[in-house]
Each structure stands twice: as C-alpha cells, then as structure tokens.
Image (cartoon, rainbow, N blue to C red):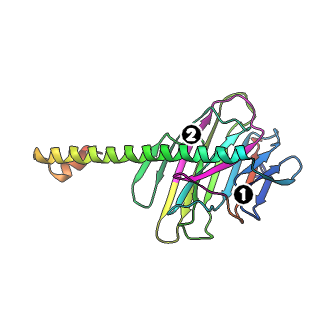
Amino acid sequence: MPTKLIVDCSTGITTEVELTAEEIAQREVEAAAFAVAEAERIAAEEAKAQAKASAEAKLAALGLTAEEIAALGK
Amino acid sequence: MASTYILIAKTTLTTSQSSVTFSSIPQTYTDLILHQSAMSNVSTSLAGNYNIEFNGVTTGYSGRRIYADPSGGAASDTGTPKWAGFIPGTGATQNVPNSCTLYIGNYTSSNYKPWKLDVVVENQTSSAYEGLGTNLWSNTAAITSIVLKDISSGANTGSFLANSTFTLYGIKNS
C-alpha cells in the first residue's frame, strides 16, 4: 500500500500514513488528467511549429531569403 | 546566510512516499521557501512533474511556466496550475536528484497567494530540463499546510524515492 509522509512543523514529528482507497483512486484520476493536458500541450506545440514552417515556406516562395525570414521573427 | 532565513522543518525520506506534507506551519514569518532535492520512480525517459496544494484545497490555482528540455529551445504553457517542478524519473541517471526552490510570498495574508519556482533536472552531461514557474492560489486563507504530490509522466504515477530531501524555511522581513 502506498504511503504519504506528514511533517508536523509545530512538533517536528514525522508520521507515515497509508493512502486510503479514495486517495489512490484520486491519484490515478489526476494522473490521467495530466496525461490529457500534456497531450494537448504537445499537440499545440506541434501545430505551432507546423504553422511556422508553412509560413516560412510561403515567404521563401515569394523570394525572401532565409536571413530575411529569420529577421521577421526577431 | 541572513538571520532572517530560518529553518522550520526538514525531512529526508527513508522509504518511498506518494506525497510529503508540511502541516501546522507557523504563522510568524513573512514568506516561505521550500527547497526540494528529490527523485522519483515515475516511468519516463527523463523528467516527470509534480504538484503542490495548500491547506488541502484542490481549487483556485493558476499559473504559467517557461521551460527548456533536451530537444532544445524553450516553451511556455499555462496548463500546469499546481506545478511544483520537474523531477527525474527512471530514465534519468539514477541518484541525481532535482534541485527545486519555491518561494511563497505573504503566506499569512488575506490576499491571494503567489508563488514562483525554479527547477533543474540534470542527466549527467547529456541533457537537462530547466523550468521557471509563476503561479497563484486565488484564496484568502493563510497557508497552514503544504503538500507535494501527484508525481506523473503521462498516465503513470510515481512516488518520491528514499533519500529525497524537503526543507522548509521561514523568511522574516526584519
């Protein structure tokens, strides 16, 4: 059974407590929520990178040099 | 170190723990500093994440972080409202803990509570994660307890490993 540690700052006493079934279930719920949020974050980053690459390709097709395109981002 | 920087409590784990709580925090300081030197058994190539909660309250948190990872470049996001830092997992070099410091200002006031953090997870010569976080707990209650918990990478959950150290300091403004 997983445990948690509680440090009482008023006494300095440290206590190890077993997690309840509810706490274990909550850990799994929160981990699943984190997984969803992390997947969304990664997808957003990938979409942003793809949009940037697409924009740079279009600018290059218009005749801008790589240096000129890079200067636009500064 | 300035005399206004005072140790409240410190613990070094002797066994793995799913969370670490500091309870009955004295209300006699202006700010708090919580330093962690921690490792986890979360299954990840390098770094997992963990969270913080105050007073056992699960709502009212918001935040933004900027970070860099081994793939290069920096990124930012707002999807980590309780973020307390990166932590090395099973894919990182073992026995090299993170270094993470949280600064919690005006923790006894009746205003909302901001906190900031800086963290690094180092993987010996090959790669590293670095992060800076700015967060807010929109709650007027004085902070009396702090819990570090919810270590995760993807849908995996982990625990803080033995030899992880957590140190809470009080800061006085005079």
- Of B101 and A54, the residue lying toward us: A54
**B111, above or below B131, in the image:** above
Asked if residue B140 lies in the magenta stretch, the reply is yes
Q: Chain of mark 1?
A: B
Total numbered badges shown on the rendered structure: 2
Real-space Cα separation, disc 1 to disc 2, in angstroms: 22 Å
Q: Position of residue B99 (x, y in %)?
A: 62, 59
**One can see residue B83 in this view:** no
- In this rendering, would A57 be left or right of B93? left
- In this rendering, would A63 be left or right of B74? left
The mark found on residue B61 in the picture is none
Which residue is depicted at the point 56% across and 70% down?
Answer: B93
**A30, above or below B167, in the image:** above
Magenta segment: B131-159
* Residue type of the residue flagged with mark 2: Pro
Which residue is depicted at the point 77% across and 47% down?
Answer: B22
Closer to the observer: label 1 or label 2? 1
Q: Position of residue B15 (x, y in %)?
A: 75, 64
Which residue in the protein does label 1 denote?
A: B17
Q: Position of residue B151 (x, y in %)?
A: 61, 53
Which residue in the protein does label 2 denote?
A: B81
